[in-house]
Image (cartoon, rainbow, N blue to C red):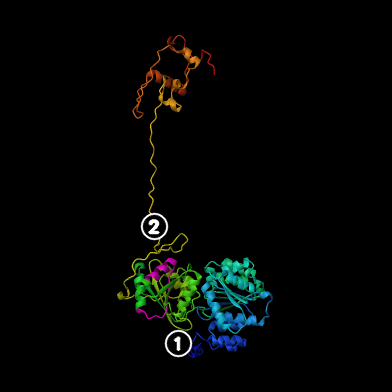
Amino acid sequence: MTENTEESVLEPRADKPNFLTEKRFDQFELHPLLLQGLQEAGFIQCTPIQAETLPISLVGKDVAGQAQTGTGKTAAFLVTVFSRLLEKSPLPDNLPSALIVAPTRELALQIHEEALKIGKYLDFSIHAVIGGIDYQKQAETLRHGADIVICTPGRIIDYYKQGIFKPGAIQVVVIDEADRLLDMGFAQDMRFILRKLPRYDKRQSMLFSATLSYHVLELTYEFMNVPEFISVTPEKTSVEGIEQILYHVGADQKLSLLLGILQNETWNRVLIFVNTKSGVEWVSRKLKGNGLPAEGISGDLPQPKRLKLMERFKEGKVTILIATDVASRGIHVEDITHVINYDLPQDPENYIHRIGRTARAGKTGKALSLACETYVFHLEAIEALLGNKIPVAWPPPEWFVEDRAGTITIERDKRGGKKDTKPSKQRPAKPVEKTRPPVSTFRFTIPREEGYFPGAFFGFGPRQAQSETPEPAIAESKPETPEAPAPAISPDPHEPAAVESESVKAPAKKRRRRRKKKPQAQPAETANADSPKDPSEDEIPF
Protein backbone atom coordinates (compact mmCIF):
# COMPACT_ATOMS: atom_id res chain seq x y z
CA MET A 1 0.00 0.00 0.00
CA THR A 2 1.31 3.49 -0.76
CA GLU A 3 2.33 5.93 1.91
CA ASN A 4 -0.47 8.40 1.23
CA THR A 5 -3.15 5.73 1.46
CA GLU A 6 -1.77 4.45 4.74
CA GLU A 7 -1.81 7.91 6.29
CA SER A 8 -5.47 8.29 5.32
CA VAL A 9 -6.24 5.08 7.21
CA LEU A 10 -4.23 6.07 10.25
CA GLU A 11 -6.04 9.38 10.65
CA PRO A 12 -9.83 9.18 11.03
CA ARG A 13 -11.80 11.33 8.64
CA ALA A 14 -13.28 14.50 10.07
CA ASP A 15 -16.57 13.94 8.25
CA LYS A 16 -16.65 10.26 9.29
CA PRO A 17 -15.75 10.11 12.98
CA ASN A 18 -17.56 6.78 13.50
CA PHE A 19 -15.91 4.88 10.67
CA LEU A 20 -12.64 4.24 12.51
CA THR A 21 -12.19 3.94 16.24
CA GLU A 22 -9.24 4.69 18.50
CA LYS A 23 -8.66 0.96 18.93
CA ARG A 24 -5.63 -0.32 17.01
CA PHE A 25 -4.81 -3.86 15.92
CA ASP A 26 -1.42 -3.76 17.60
CA GLN A 27 -3.18 -3.35 20.97
CA PHE A 28 -4.37 -6.95 20.76
CA GLU A 29 -2.04 -9.83 21.53
CA LEU A 30 -1.64 -10.92 17.93
CA HIS A 31 1.10 -13.00 16.36
CA PRO A 32 3.89 -10.77 14.93
CA LEU A 33 3.57 -12.30 11.46
CA LEU A 34 -0.19 -11.77 11.51
CA LEU A 35 0.26 -8.17 12.64
CA GLN A 36 2.76 -7.58 9.86
CA GLY A 37 0.29 -8.85 7.28
CA LEU A 38 -2.42 -6.59 8.68
CA GLN A 39 -0.23 -3.52 8.51
CA GLU A 40 0.85 -4.19 4.93
CA ALA A 41 -2.80 -4.71 3.96
CA GLY A 42 -3.67 -1.30 5.45
CA PHE A 43 -5.42 -2.44 8.63
CA ILE A 44 -4.12 -0.15 11.36
CA GLN A 45 -7.15 1.11 13.26
CA CYS A 46 -10.26 -0.95 13.93
CA THR A 47 -13.72 -0.28 12.63
CA PRO A 48 -16.58 -0.46 15.18
CA ILE A 49 -17.45 -4.08 14.34
CA GLN A 50 -13.79 -5.09 14.61
CA ALA A 51 -13.31 -3.27 17.90
CA GLU A 52 -16.40 -4.93 19.37
CA THR A 53 -15.85 -8.43 17.99
CA LEU A 54 -12.13 -9.13 18.48
CA PRO A 55 -12.03 -8.90 22.32
CA ILE A 56 -14.72 -11.61 22.46
CA SER A 57 -13.75 -13.85 19.56
CA LEU A 58 -10.01 -13.94 20.33
CA VAL A 59 -10.71 -15.70 23.64
CA GLY A 60 -12.71 -18.45 21.90
CA LYS A 61 -16.33 -17.35 22.45
CA ASP A 62 -19.01 -17.61 19.81
CA VAL A 63 -20.08 -14.35 18.17
CA ALA A 64 -23.13 -13.31 16.15
CA GLY A 65 -22.40 -9.89 14.67
CA GLN A 66 -24.52 -7.37 12.80
CA ALA A 67 -22.90 -4.45 11.06
CA GLN A 68 -23.29 -2.19 8.08
CA THR A 69 -22.11 -3.52 4.74
CA GLY A 70 -18.51 -2.60 4.02
CA THR A 71 -17.41 -1.90 7.60
CA GLY A 72 -14.81 -4.66 7.97
CA LYS A 73 -16.64 -7.83 9.01
CA THR A 74 -14.32 -9.91 6.84
CA ALA A 75 -11.16 -8.74 8.58
CA ALA A 76 -12.81 -9.26 11.98
CA PHE A 77 -13.39 -12.99 11.53
CA LEU A 78 -10.19 -13.60 9.50
CA VAL A 79 -8.04 -12.23 12.33
CA THR A 80 -9.88 -14.53 14.73
CA VAL A 81 -9.46 -17.58 12.50
CA PHE A 82 -5.70 -17.03 12.06
CA SER A 83 -5.16 -16.39 15.77
CA ARG A 84 -7.09 -19.46 16.87
CA LEU A 85 -5.27 -21.75 14.43
CA LEU A 86 -1.88 -20.39 15.51
CA GLU A 87 -2.67 -21.47 19.06
CA LYS A 88 -3.53 -25.03 18.00
CA SER A 89 -1.04 -27.70 17.02
CA PRO A 90 -1.11 -28.99 13.42
CA LEU A 91 -3.67 -31.70 12.81
CA PRO A 92 -2.76 -35.11 11.36
CA ASP A 93 -3.73 -36.24 7.88
CA ASN A 94 -3.86 -32.62 6.66
CA LEU A 95 -7.53 -32.26 7.61
CA PRO A 96 -9.03 -28.75 7.34
CA SER A 97 -9.13 -26.76 10.57
CA ALA A 98 -11.38 -23.84 9.59
CA LEU A 99 -14.43 -23.54 7.35
CA ILE A 100 -15.83 -20.25 6.02
CA VAL A 101 -19.17 -20.42 4.20
CA ALA A 102 -20.36 -17.61 1.90
CA PRO A 103 -23.57 -17.36 -0.14
CA THR A 104 -22.07 -16.42 -3.52
CA ARG A 105 -18.96 -17.29 -5.47
CA GLU A 106 -17.97 -13.64 -5.74
CA LEU A 107 -18.07 -13.19 -1.98
CA ALA A 108 -16.14 -16.42 -1.40
CA LEU A 109 -13.42 -15.28 -3.79
CA GLN A 110 -13.34 -11.86 -2.13
CA ILE A 111 -12.82 -13.47 1.29
CA HIS A 112 -10.12 -15.70 -0.20
CA GLU A 113 -8.31 -12.70 -1.65
CA GLU A 114 -8.51 -10.83 1.67
CA ALA A 115 -7.25 -13.88 3.56
CA LEU A 116 -4.21 -14.18 1.30
CA LYS A 117 -3.31 -10.55 2.02
CA ILE A 118 -3.74 -10.73 5.78
CA GLY A 119 -2.14 -14.18 6.13
CA LYS A 120 0.68 -13.42 3.73
CA TYR A 121 3.43 -14.40 6.20
CA LEU A 122 1.58 -17.28 7.86
CA ASP A 123 2.19 -20.91 6.96
CA PHE A 124 -1.44 -21.80 6.22
CA SER A 125 -2.87 -23.27 3.07
CA ILE A 126 -5.97 -21.29 2.11
CA HIS A 127 -8.20 -22.52 -0.70
CA ALA A 128 -11.51 -21.45 -2.21
CA VAL A 129 -13.96 -24.21 -3.08
CA ILE A 130 -16.73 -22.85 -5.30
CA GLY A 131 -18.89 -24.09 -8.13
CA GLY A 132 -18.46 -23.41 -11.80
CA ILE A 133 -14.68 -23.93 -12.15
CA ASP A 134 -11.87 -26.45 -11.58
CA TYR A 135 -13.88 -29.36 -10.20
CA GLN A 136 -11.05 -31.91 -10.35
CA LYS A 137 -8.41 -29.39 -9.31
CA GLN A 138 -10.33 -28.38 -6.21
CA ALA A 139 -10.92 -32.03 -5.37
CA GLU A 140 -7.19 -32.76 -5.56
CA THR A 141 -6.49 -29.73 -3.36
CA LEU A 142 -8.80 -31.03 -0.65
CA ARG A 143 -7.25 -34.49 -0.86
CA HIS A 144 -3.75 -33.10 -0.37
CA GLY A 145 -4.90 -30.97 2.55
CA ALA A 146 -6.12 -27.41 3.22
CA ASP A 147 -5.98 -25.58 6.54
CA ILE A 148 -8.68 -23.01 5.74
CA VAL A 149 -11.51 -23.78 3.30
CA ILE A 150 -13.60 -20.91 1.96
CA CYS A 151 -16.61 -22.30 0.14
CA THR A 152 -20.14 -22.04 -1.13
CA PRO A 153 -22.65 -24.59 0.23
CA GLY A 154 -23.41 -26.58 -2.91
CA ARG A 155 -19.87 -27.49 -3.93
CA ILE A 156 -18.65 -28.38 -0.40
CA ILE A 157 -21.65 -30.69 0.13
CA ASP A 158 -20.83 -32.39 -3.16
CA TYR A 159 -17.25 -33.06 -2.03
CA TYR A 160 -18.45 -34.26 1.37
CA LYS A 161 -20.79 -36.85 -0.15
CA GLN A 162 -17.90 -38.17 -2.25
CA GLY A 163 -15.66 -38.47 0.81
CA ILE A 164 -13.25 -35.78 -0.43
CA PHE A 165 -14.05 -33.15 2.20
CA LYS A 166 -13.72 -34.46 5.76
CA PRO A 167 -15.04 -32.00 8.37
CA GLY A 168 -14.26 -34.04 11.48
CA ALA A 169 -11.37 -31.77 12.59
CA ILE A 170 -12.97 -28.34 12.06
CA GLN A 171 -12.11 -26.04 14.96
CA VAL A 172 -13.54 -22.74 13.71
CA VAL A 173 -16.55 -22.19 11.46
CA VAL A 174 -17.68 -18.84 10.04
CA ILE A 175 -21.00 -18.12 8.33
CA ASP A 176 -20.80 -14.87 6.39
CA GLU A 177 -23.90 -13.05 5.11
CA ALA A 178 -26.14 -15.53 6.86
CA ASP A 179 -29.35 -13.74 5.91
CA ARG A 180 -28.41 -13.91 2.26
CA LEU A 181 -27.70 -17.64 2.55
CA LEU A 182 -31.20 -18.24 3.85
CA ASP A 183 -32.81 -15.94 1.30
CA MET A 184 -31.14 -17.85 -1.54
CA GLY A 185 -32.60 -21.14 -0.33
CA PHE A 186 -29.55 -22.56 1.46
CA ALA A 187 -31.30 -23.13 4.80
CA GLN A 188 -31.36 -26.93 4.44
CA ASP A 189 -27.82 -26.98 3.06
CA MET A 190 -26.50 -24.97 6.01
CA ARG A 191 -28.16 -27.28 8.49
CA PHE A 192 -26.70 -30.27 6.65
CA ILE A 193 -23.19 -28.78 6.83
CA LEU A 194 -23.43 -27.74 10.46
CA ARG A 195 -24.68 -31.17 11.52
CA LYS A 196 -21.62 -32.83 9.95
CA LEU A 197 -19.19 -30.62 11.89
CA PRO A 198 -18.00 -31.36 15.44
CA ARG A 199 -20.45 -30.44 18.19
CA TYR A 200 -21.00 -26.74 18.88
CA ASP A 201 -19.23 -27.05 22.25
CA LYS A 202 -16.11 -28.50 20.56
CA ARG A 203 -15.62 -25.73 18.02
CA GLN A 204 -15.87 -21.95 17.79
CA SER A 205 -18.65 -20.50 15.66
CA MET A 206 -19.00 -17.00 14.25
CA LEU A 207 -21.92 -15.62 12.28
CA PHE A 208 -21.99 -12.26 10.53
CA SER A 209 -24.68 -10.52 8.58
CA ALA A 210 -25.90 -7.06 7.66
CA THR A 211 -29.31 -7.93 9.10
CA LEU A 212 -30.22 -10.45 11.79
CA SER A 213 -33.68 -11.81 11.04
CA TYR A 214 -35.56 -14.43 13.04
CA HIS A 215 -34.41 -17.18 10.67
CA VAL A 216 -30.79 -16.21 11.26
CA LEU A 217 -31.28 -16.15 15.02
CA GLU A 218 -32.77 -19.65 14.79
CA LEU A 219 -29.45 -20.87 13.40
CA THR A 220 -27.59 -19.28 16.30
CA TYR A 221 -29.79 -20.96 18.88
CA GLU A 222 -29.51 -24.38 17.23
CA PHE A 223 -25.86 -24.57 16.19
CA MET A 224 -23.94 -22.07 18.33
CA ASN A 225 -22.73 -22.23 21.90
CA VAL A 226 -24.49 -19.27 23.62
CA PRO A 227 -23.12 -16.61 21.25
CA GLU A 228 -22.45 -12.99 22.12
CA PHE A 229 -24.66 -10.71 20.02
CA ILE A 230 -22.93 -7.61 18.72
CA SER A 231 -24.70 -4.90 16.76
CA VAL A 232 -22.99 -1.65 15.96
CA THR A 233 -26.01 -0.24 14.10
CA PRO A 234 -29.08 -1.08 16.20
CA GLU A 235 -31.30 1.71 14.90
CA LYS A 236 -29.89 2.74 11.54
CA THR A 237 -29.77 0.12 8.80
CA SER A 238 -28.62 1.99 5.71
CA VAL A 239 -25.03 3.00 5.18
CA GLU A 240 -24.04 6.45 6.22
CA GLY A 241 -22.51 8.67 3.59
CA ILE A 242 -24.82 7.51 0.79
CA GLU A 243 -26.95 10.15 -0.90
CA GLN A 244 -30.19 8.40 -1.84
CA ILE A 245 -32.46 9.78 -4.58
CA LEU A 246 -35.69 8.32 -5.96
CA TYR A 247 -37.04 9.08 -9.44
CA HIS A 248 -40.64 8.21 -10.34
CA VAL A 249 -40.63 7.39 -14.03
CA GLY A 250 -42.64 5.28 -16.45
CA ALA A 251 -41.29 1.94 -17.59
CA ASP A 252 -41.07 3.20 -21.17
CA GLN A 253 -38.86 6.13 -20.09
CA LYS A 254 -36.48 4.34 -17.71
CA LEU A 255 -33.79 3.75 -20.30
CA SER A 256 -34.00 7.34 -21.53
CA LEU A 257 -33.58 8.64 -17.96
CA LEU A 258 -30.72 6.20 -17.32
CA LEU A 259 -28.86 7.58 -20.33
CA GLY A 260 -29.45 11.10 -19.06
CA ILE A 261 -28.14 10.24 -15.58
CA LEU A 262 -24.95 8.79 -17.04
CA GLN A 263 -24.48 11.92 -19.14
CA ASN A 264 -25.13 14.49 -16.41
CA GLU A 265 -23.71 12.83 -13.28
CA THR A 266 -20.00 12.87 -12.47
CA TRP A 267 -19.07 9.24 -11.93
CA ASN A 268 -16.02 7.03 -11.77
CA ARG A 269 -17.51 3.52 -11.63
CA VAL A 270 -21.21 2.74 -11.85
CA LEU A 271 -23.00 -0.40 -10.70
CA ILE A 272 -26.51 -0.87 -12.15
CA PHE A 273 -28.88 -3.45 -10.67
CA VAL A 274 -31.64 -5.17 -12.68
CA ASN A 275 -33.98 -7.82 -11.31
CA THR A 276 -33.81 -10.36 -14.16
CA LYS A 277 -31.11 -11.97 -16.29
CA SER A 278 -32.80 -10.97 -19.52
CA GLY A 279 -33.02 -7.42 -18.20
CA VAL A 280 -29.26 -7.38 -17.57
CA GLU A 281 -28.59 -8.48 -21.15
CA TRP A 282 -31.05 -5.96 -22.57
CA VAL A 283 -29.73 -2.96 -20.59
CA SER A 284 -26.10 -3.82 -21.34
CA ARG A 285 -26.78 -4.05 -25.08
CA LYS A 286 -28.68 -0.78 -24.98
CA LEU A 287 -25.84 1.03 -23.23
CA LYS A 288 -23.29 -0.42 -25.65
CA GLY A 289 -25.46 0.67 -28.54
CA ASN A 290 -25.35 4.21 -27.16
CA GLY A 291 -21.56 4.22 -26.95
CA LEU A 292 -21.15 3.49 -23.22
CA PRO A 293 -18.58 0.95 -21.90
CA ALA A 294 -20.98 -1.42 -20.16
CA GLU A 295 -20.89 -5.14 -19.38
CA GLY A 296 -23.46 -7.43 -17.81
CA ILE A 297 -23.00 -10.11 -15.17
CA SER A 298 -25.67 -12.59 -14.10
CA GLY A 299 -26.05 -16.07 -12.71
CA ASP A 300 -25.96 -17.89 -16.06
CA LEU A 301 -22.62 -16.37 -17.06
CA PRO A 302 -19.84 -19.02 -16.86
CA GLN A 303 -17.66 -18.62 -13.79
CA PRO A 304 -14.36 -17.99 -15.63
CA LYS A 305 -15.98 -15.15 -17.56
CA ARG A 306 -17.47 -13.76 -14.37
CA LEU A 307 -14.06 -13.71 -12.72
CA LYS A 308 -12.42 -11.98 -15.68
CA LEU A 309 -15.22 -9.44 -15.86
CA MET A 310 -14.98 -8.64 -12.14
CA GLU A 311 -11.23 -8.26 -12.45
CA ARG A 312 -11.63 -5.83 -15.34
CA PHE A 313 -14.19 -3.88 -13.32
CA LYS A 314 -11.81 -3.59 -10.38
CA GLU A 315 -8.97 -2.49 -12.66
CA GLY A 316 -11.12 0.20 -14.25
CA LYS A 317 -11.17 -1.34 -17.73
CA VAL A 318 -14.95 -1.69 -17.39
CA THR A 319 -16.56 1.33 -15.76
CA ILE A 320 -20.26 0.37 -15.98
CA LEU A 321 -21.38 -3.01 -14.67
CA ILE A 322 -24.97 -4.26 -14.90
CA ALA A 323 -25.79 -7.07 -12.51
CA THR A 324 -28.53 -8.96 -10.73
CA ASP A 325 -28.67 -9.41 -6.96
CA VAL A 326 -26.13 -12.23 -7.26
CA ALA A 327 -23.48 -9.47 -7.44
CA SER A 328 -24.82 -7.37 -4.56
CA ARG A 329 -22.70 -9.44 -2.20
CA GLY A 330 -19.04 -9.94 -2.92
CA ILE A 331 -18.25 -6.82 -4.97
CA HIS A 332 -15.60 -5.06 -2.91
CA VAL A 333 -14.53 -2.10 -5.02
CA GLU A 334 -13.85 0.97 -2.95
CA ASP A 335 -14.30 3.61 -5.64
CA ILE A 336 -17.82 2.81 -6.91
CA THR A 337 -19.29 6.30 -6.98
CA HIS A 338 -22.84 5.46 -8.12
CA VAL A 339 -25.25 2.59 -7.58
CA ILE A 340 -28.34 2.76 -9.79
CA ASN A 341 -31.37 0.60 -9.09
CA TYR A 342 -32.81 0.32 -12.59
CA ASP A 343 -35.41 -1.96 -10.99
CA LEU A 344 -36.44 -1.64 -7.35
CA PRO A 345 -35.63 -4.94 -5.57
CA GLN A 346 -38.47 -7.18 -4.55
CA ASP A 347 -36.74 -8.00 -1.25
CA PRO A 348 -36.23 -4.84 0.85
CA GLU A 349 -33.03 -6.21 2.40
CA ASN A 350 -31.49 -6.45 -1.07
CA TYR A 351 -31.85 -2.68 -1.36
CA ILE A 352 -29.50 -2.24 1.59
CA HIS A 353 -26.96 -4.65 0.13
CA ARG A 354 -27.17 -3.00 -3.26
CA ILE A 355 -26.52 0.53 -2.10
CA GLY A 356 -23.84 -0.79 0.26
CA ARG A 357 -21.56 -1.34 -2.74
CA THR A 358 -20.84 2.41 -2.71
CA ALA A 359 -19.52 4.61 0.12
CA ARG A 360 -17.15 1.86 1.26
CA ALA A 361 -14.12 2.42 3.46
CA GLY A 362 -15.41 5.79 4.65
CA LYS A 363 -16.02 7.26 1.22
CA THR A 364 -19.21 8.87 -0.07
CA GLY A 365 -21.46 7.77 -2.89
CA LYS A 366 -24.86 8.08 -4.53
CA ALA A 367 -27.70 5.57 -4.76
CA LEU A 368 -30.23 6.42 -7.47
CA SER A 369 -33.43 4.41 -7.83
CA LEU A 370 -35.90 4.39 -10.73
CA ALA A 371 -39.42 3.55 -9.55
CA CYS A 372 -41.67 2.46 -12.42
CA GLU A 373 -45.22 1.16 -12.33
CA THR A 374 -43.96 -2.45 -12.29
CA TYR A 375 -41.77 -2.36 -9.17
CA VAL A 376 -43.01 0.72 -7.29
CA PHE A 377 -45.14 -1.56 -5.12
CA HIS A 378 -41.96 -2.69 -3.29
CA LEU A 379 -41.09 0.87 -2.26
CA GLU A 380 -43.22 0.81 0.88
CA ALA A 381 -41.43 -2.23 2.32
CA ILE A 382 -38.02 -0.72 1.49
CA GLU A 383 -38.81 2.56 3.25
CA ALA A 384 -40.25 0.65 6.23
CA LEU A 385 -36.94 -1.21 6.60
CA LEU A 386 -34.94 2.00 6.24
CA GLY A 387 -37.08 3.80 8.79
CA ASN A 388 -37.39 6.89 6.62
CA LYS A 389 -38.61 8.06 3.22
CA ILE A 390 -36.21 8.10 0.29
CA PRO A 391 -35.94 11.69 -1.02
CA VAL A 392 -37.80 12.12 -4.30
CA ALA A 393 -36.37 14.22 -7.14
CA TRP A 394 -37.86 15.14 -10.51
CA PRO A 395 -35.37 15.09 -13.38
CA PRO A 396 -35.39 18.02 -15.83
CA PRO A 397 -36.72 17.33 -19.35
CA GLU A 398 -33.24 17.47 -20.89
CA TRP A 399 -32.25 14.42 -18.84
CA PHE A 400 -34.45 12.21 -21.00
CA VAL A 401 -32.00 11.30 -23.77
CA GLU A 402 -32.99 9.69 -27.04
CA ASP A 403 -32.07 6.03 -27.43
CA ARG A 404 -29.89 5.43 -30.49
CA ALA A 405 -29.41 1.68 -30.07
CA GLY A 406 -32.56 0.61 -31.89
CA THR A 407 -34.68 -2.43 -31.15
CA ILE A 408 -33.05 -5.25 -29.21
CA THR A 409 -34.74 -8.57 -28.51
CA ILE A 410 -33.42 -11.23 -26.17
CA GLU A 411 -34.46 -14.78 -27.08
CA ARG A 412 -34.00 -17.67 -24.67
CA ASP A 413 -34.31 -21.37 -25.06
CA LYS A 414 -36.38 -23.69 -22.90
CA ARG A 415 -33.64 -23.90 -20.26
CA GLY A 416 -33.48 -20.13 -19.88
CA GLY A 417 -30.18 -19.69 -21.70
CA LYS A 418 -29.61 -17.19 -24.46
CA LYS A 419 -30.06 -18.41 -27.99
CA ASP A 420 -27.28 -17.90 -30.50
CA THR A 421 -28.68 -15.23 -32.79
CA LYS A 422 -25.62 -15.13 -35.09
CA PRO A 423 -26.40 -16.03 -38.71
CA SER A 424 -25.28 -19.50 -39.72
CA LYS A 425 -22.69 -19.90 -42.46
CA GLN A 426 -24.38 -23.00 -43.84
CA ARG A 427 -26.98 -22.56 -46.54
CA PRO A 428 -30.39 -23.10 -45.02
CA ALA A 429 -32.27 -26.08 -46.34
CA LYS A 430 -35.27 -25.46 -48.52
CA PRO A 431 -38.54 -25.98 -46.71
CA VAL A 432 -40.32 -29.15 -47.67
CA GLU A 433 -43.99 -28.70 -48.41
CA LYS A 434 -46.01 -31.33 -46.67
CA THR A 435 -48.85 -32.53 -48.95
CA ARG A 436 -51.26 -35.39 -48.50
CA PRO A 437 -50.77 -38.31 -50.91
CA PRO A 438 -53.37 -38.46 -53.67
CA VAL A 439 -56.26 -40.83 -53.06
CA SER A 440 -56.45 -43.49 -55.77
CA THR A 441 -59.94 -44.04 -57.09
CA PHE A 442 -61.08 -47.08 -59.08
CA ARG A 443 -64.23 -48.77 -60.15
CA PHE A 444 -65.06 -52.41 -60.16
CA THR A 445 -67.99 -54.39 -61.50
CA ILE A 446 -69.82 -57.13 -59.65
CA PRO A 447 -71.07 -60.12 -61.62
CA ARG A 448 -74.84 -60.06 -61.53
CA GLU A 449 -76.58 -63.36 -61.26
CA GLU A 450 -80.19 -64.19 -61.04
CA GLY A 451 -81.66 -63.15 -57.69
CA TYR A 452 -78.90 -60.54 -57.08
CA PHE A 453 -79.60 -58.03 -54.34
CA PRO A 454 -77.41 -54.83 -53.98
CA GLY A 455 -76.48 -55.45 -50.34
CA ALA A 456 -75.81 -59.15 -50.68
CA PHE A 457 -72.17 -58.57 -51.71
CA PHE A 458 -71.44 -56.90 -48.32
CA GLY A 459 -73.25 -59.48 -46.22
CA PHE A 460 -76.56 -57.81 -45.47
CA GLY A 461 -79.96 -57.53 -47.14
CA PRO A 462 -83.37 -59.24 -47.12
CA ARG A 463 -83.76 -62.78 -45.96
CA GLN A 464 -84.51 -63.99 -49.50
CA ALA A 465 -81.21 -62.67 -50.78
CA GLN A 466 -79.17 -64.26 -47.93
CA SER A 467 -80.65 -67.76 -47.85
CA GLU A 468 -80.78 -70.01 -50.90
CA THR A 469 -83.80 -72.02 -49.62
CA PRO A 470 -86.55 -70.65 -47.44
CA GLU A 471 -87.38 -72.15 -44.08
CA PRO A 472 -89.49 -75.32 -44.45
CA ALA A 473 -92.49 -74.27 -42.31
CA ILE A 474 -92.86 -70.87 -43.89
CA ALA A 475 -92.35 -72.23 -47.41
CA GLU A 476 -95.27 -74.69 -46.97
CA SER A 477 -97.61 -72.00 -45.67
CA LYS A 478 -96.99 -69.53 -48.51
CA PRO A 479 -99.25 -69.60 -51.53
CA GLU A 480 -97.73 -70.14 -54.87
CA THR A 481 -97.08 -66.75 -56.41
CA PRO A 482 -95.15 -65.90 -59.50
CA GLU A 483 -91.55 -65.01 -58.79
CA ALA A 484 -90.90 -61.27 -58.99
CA PRO A 485 -88.22 -60.20 -61.42
CA ALA A 486 -84.93 -58.85 -60.05
CA PRO A 487 -84.80 -55.07 -59.73
CA ALA A 488 -83.10 -53.25 -62.53
CA ILE A 489 -79.73 -51.81 -61.55
CA SER A 490 -77.98 -49.05 -63.41
CA PRO A 491 -74.46 -49.89 -64.65
CA ASP A 492 -73.21 -46.64 -63.00
CA PRO A 493 -72.94 -47.18 -59.21
CA HIS A 494 -73.50 -43.45 -58.60
CA GLU A 495 -76.98 -43.55 -60.20
CA PRO A 496 -79.93 -44.50 -57.96
CA ALA A 497 -81.06 -48.08 -58.18
CA ALA A 498 -84.48 -49.07 -59.48
CA VAL A 499 -87.38 -49.16 -57.04
CA GLU A 500 -87.89 -52.55 -55.49
CA SER A 501 -91.14 -54.35 -55.99
CA GLU A 502 -93.65 -54.94 -53.22
CA SER A 503 -92.91 -58.66 -53.24
CA VAL A 504 -89.34 -57.92 -52.20
CA LYS A 505 -90.24 -55.32 -49.61
CA ALA A 506 -93.14 -57.22 -48.05
CA PRO A 507 -91.07 -59.78 -46.13
CA ALA A 508 -88.87 -56.99 -44.73
CA LYS A 509 -91.95 -55.18 -43.35
CA LYS A 510 -93.28 -58.43 -41.91
CA ARG A 511 -89.92 -59.05 -40.27
CA ARG A 512 -89.89 -55.61 -38.66
CA ARG A 513 -93.43 -56.17 -37.32
CA ARG A 514 -92.28 -59.40 -35.68
CA ARG A 515 -89.48 -57.55 -33.89
CA LYS A 516 -91.80 -54.88 -32.54
CA LYS A 517 -94.77 -57.05 -31.59
CA LYS A 518 -95.38 -60.78 -31.50
CA PRO A 519 -98.21 -61.89 -33.84
CA GLN A 520 -101.34 -63.15 -32.09
CA ALA A 521 -103.26 -66.29 -33.23
CA GLN A 522 -106.42 -65.42 -35.19
CA PRO A 523 -109.74 -67.27 -34.62
CA ALA A 524 -110.55 -69.98 -37.14
CA GLU A 525 -113.91 -68.51 -38.13
CA THR A 526 -112.41 -65.10 -38.99
CA ALA A 527 -109.24 -66.31 -40.68
CA ASN A 528 -108.91 -65.72 -44.38
CA ALA A 529 -108.55 -68.82 -46.46
CA ASP A 530 -105.86 -67.24 -48.58
CA SER A 531 -103.82 -66.08 -45.50
CA PRO A 532 -100.94 -68.24 -44.35
CA LYS A 533 -101.47 -70.67 -41.48
CA ASP A 534 -100.72 -69.74 -37.92
CA PRO A 535 -97.16 -70.82 -37.16
CA SER A 536 -98.34 -72.16 -33.81
CA GLU A 537 -100.41 -74.83 -35.52
CA ASP A 538 -97.47 -76.38 -37.31
CA GLU A 539 -94.36 -77.77 -35.81
CA ILE A 540 -91.51 -75.54 -36.70
CA PRO A 541 -88.10 -77.11 -36.21
CA PHE A 542 -85.60 -74.91 -34.34
Can you tell which quarter of the image residue 479 is in? Answer: top left
The type of residue carrying mark 1 is Asp
| Callout 2 amino acid | Pro
Q: Is residue 316 above or below residue 374?
A: below
**Where on the picture, by quarter, is residue 285?**
bottom left
User: In this orientation, does residue 333 appear?
Assistant: yes
Residue depicted at 63% across the width and 66% down the height:
162
Q: Is residue 352 visible?
A: no
Question: So how many labels did they put on this image?
Answer: 2
Between residues 72 and 115, which one lies in front from this camera angle?
Answer: 115
Q: Are marks 1 and 2 in contact (CB under 8 Å)?
A: no
Label 2 secondary element: loop
How far from the left and from the top, in percent, is residue 274?
Answer: 43, 70
Q: Position of residue 453 (x, y in %)?
A: 41, 23
Residue 282 location, x and y as percent? 40, 68
Left or right, 428 with respect to 5, comes to left
Where does the image place residue 47, in percent across and percent down from the top left? 53, 84
Question: Which residue is under mark 2?
Answer: 428
Q: Nearer the viewer, residue 306 or 227?
A: 306
Residue 322 vs 485, above or below: the answer is below
Q: Gap in Å between the C-alphas at discs 1 and 2? A: 66 Å
Say whether disc 1 or disc 2 marks the residue closer to the N-terminus: 1
Instruction: Read off the magenta span.
Output: 264-286
Q: Which residue is mark 1?
A: 15
- Residue drawn at x 59%, y 72% is 138
Within 10 Å of the Cα at label 1, are there few (<14), some (14-19), or many (20+) other Cα atoms? few
Q: Quadrant of residue 250?
A: bottom left
Residue drawn at x 34%, y 66% is: 407
Q: Is residue 265 magenta?
A: yes
Q: Residues within 10 Å of mark 2 (few under 14, many from 20)?
A: few
Query: From the viewer's perspective, is 374 left or right of 156?
Result: left
